[in-house]
Amino acid sequence: MTQPTHSSSARSAANRPAAARSLREALAPHVDSGAIPGAVALVARGGRAEVAVVGSAHLADPAHAAGAAPMARDAIFRIASVSKPVTAAAVMMLVDDGRITLDDPVARWLPELAAPVVVRTPRSPMDDVVPAKRPVTVADLLDFRAGWGFPSDFTLPAVQPLFTDLRQGPARPDGIAGPDAWLATLAKVPMLRQPGDAWLYNTGSDLQSVLVERVTGRLFADVLAERIFGPLGMTDTGFTVPAAALDRLTSAYSPGPDGTLRLSEAPDVSWTRPPAFASGAGGLVSTVDDWYAFARMLLADGIVDGRALLSPESARRMRADRLTPEQRDASRLFLEGQGWGFGGSVDVVSVDPWNVPGRYGWVGGSGTAAHITPSTGAVSILFTQASMTAPTPPAVMRDFWTYAATV
């Protein structure tokens, strides 16, 4: 769930080696230094794609006694928050269908949220509340201004239940209660801010996945498979990994106090079972080529092989910043130089060489990043399996984005 700011990248630019001449050259030093076990990355523009595969899918450790396994292009990664744009696209498909509108109060389908309360001030205790001034709408869920979620200060009292009771953060297949129980728990948590007043991270995407289930009467995973993954040929994307493909699921690692990578999760059979809660905020696994198919659809304004998976209007709405300058400024821990559309950030200021106004996408705390730039037709996707431990993007992401900006 950790997300980047970009303030440190310019300061460190002078200390970097000369510009990489290839994508592999940009990534390999980070494997050699031990910062990441491996990576699969793609940079594309004008229909031409450069792909690099470096390092290992699994390091030599007790879970892999046979030793390190080389990374492969079709490696499957836990993509964490890079799930968010996919979830938002599913909601917008229901808008296109006429089943919901952006202005609809969500309580029609999520009655648990019919009478929410808000803490009197962000620092108020959880029992010092006032009624919400208006209903929460579908648009509020999509642009993260519903009132629940993470601010820049994680210590606020109304934020703590998101960690302790709702398990917001890195998703495991069996780690969260089912959607009805999850929503009932959330309904007991007061909002941190009034609907529409502030951008708050993450919780809106999980609410979107519950909304899709309630509107359609179907499992969220099944809706994604039918409406997005199937039509786009995203055969390795979902909330589970088939047993026959489990050997392609990469191990997940976290840096220890000394910076050395430590195994945090090896692939196991739990990934072959559907999770109780299909987290729209961060529960998907995918491959770089699968996400590239999704990226091309968004760049084409929702059109694939002459068929509209998304209406052009919905695709453009996803990629348009929705925040006020004040809301962006208050969210700089997550959004320095960026606003927020539906499901992803939108660059609004050229803070670094890779920032182009209108660039859309997001970053996952598992070490993943995926962006499109509609004005240039560029796509950049980086999947690693080394988790982020701070808001500042790791050097491998900065170097990847720098290289992508030169292509």
Image (tube, helix red, strand yellow):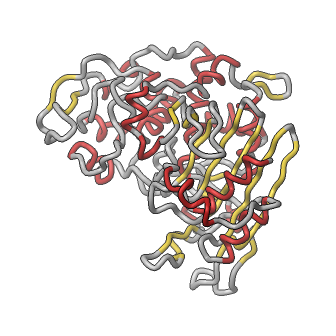
Q: Looking at the image, is 122 positioned above or below residue 401? A: above
Q: Which residue is the extreme one toward the left?
A: 128
Q: Position of residue 212 (x, y in %)?
A: 52, 29
Q: How many labels were placed on the picture?
A: 0
The furthest residue to the front: 14
Q: What residue is rendered at 60% in x and 22% in y? A: 317
Height in image: 132 above or below 150?
A: above
Image coordinates for residue 371, horizontal then vertical, percent: 66, 42
Q: Is residue 348 left or right of residue 374?
A: left
In which image quadrant can residue 385 be found? bottom right
| Res. 376 image quadrant | top right
User: Observer-nearest residue: 31 or 330?
Assistant: 330
Q: Position of residue 301 (x, y in %)?
A: 73, 24
Quick check: 187 above or below 396?
Answer: above
Image spot of residue 35 (x, y percent): 59, 72
Q: Residue at x 55, y 40 (%)?
A: 84
In the image, 176 versus 131, the foreground residue is 131
What residue lies at 25% left-to-right and 27% top-to-bottom? 116
Residue drawn at point x = 62 percent, y = 32 percent: 357
